[in-house]
Image (cartoon, rainbow, N blue to C red):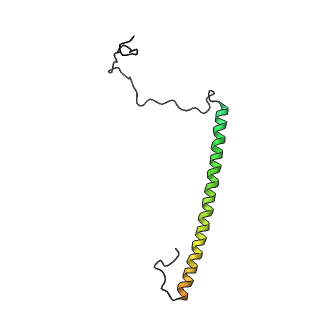
Amino acid sequence: MYPYGYYQAPPTQNDYNQYEQYDPYAQQQQYDPYDPDRQPQQLERRVTRLERENERQEREINQLQRDVNQLQRRLQRVNQRLRQVERRFNFPFTPFDGDY
């Protein structure tokens, strides 16, 4: 049985003055998309998942653009109606002259 219940490796001496022990500017291994070790099925699944996500985001963007356009038209109609009411009752124009 070991003294603390588990094996302890013997202490090792590290030479911290060793030349070029660590190079912080060393090039990291670049990702190679054409590496034969990458399974094509994995890549295909990932591509199809990203395409589906992209299509979903495009649909969401289009829906939001339609909503913005609809709200802009509605705001224009409300502003036109407000101007008509102001003219009819001789109210002074609202302090925001021009388009809202």
Q: Is residue 8 left or right of residue 84?
A: left
Question: In the shown orientation, is residue 76 left or right of residue 17?
Answer: right
Counting from the top left corner in percent of width and height, residue 24 is at: 40, 30
- Which of the two residues, 82 or 98, is positioned nearer the viewer here? 82
Q: Residue at 65% across / 49% down in the picture?
A: 55
Question: Seen in the image, is 97 located left or right of residue 59?
Answer: left
Quarter placement of the N terminus: top left
Give the percent coordinates (x, y) of residue 25.
Answer: 42, 31
Q: Nearer the viewer, residue 54 or 89?
A: 89
Against 23, is 68 above or below?
below
Answer above or below: position of 10 versus 79: above
Residue at 48% over, 80% down: 94
Residue 59 picture location, percent across and down: 64, 54
Question: How many numbered marks does the figure carry?
Answer: 0
Residue 29 percent across, percent down from the top left = 51, 29
- Taking the view exactly as shown, the residue that stands out farthest to the left is 17
Q: Residue at x 64, y 35 (%)?
A: 43
- Work out whether 74 lies above or below 4: below
Say which residue appears at 66% left-offset and 41% top-offset. 48
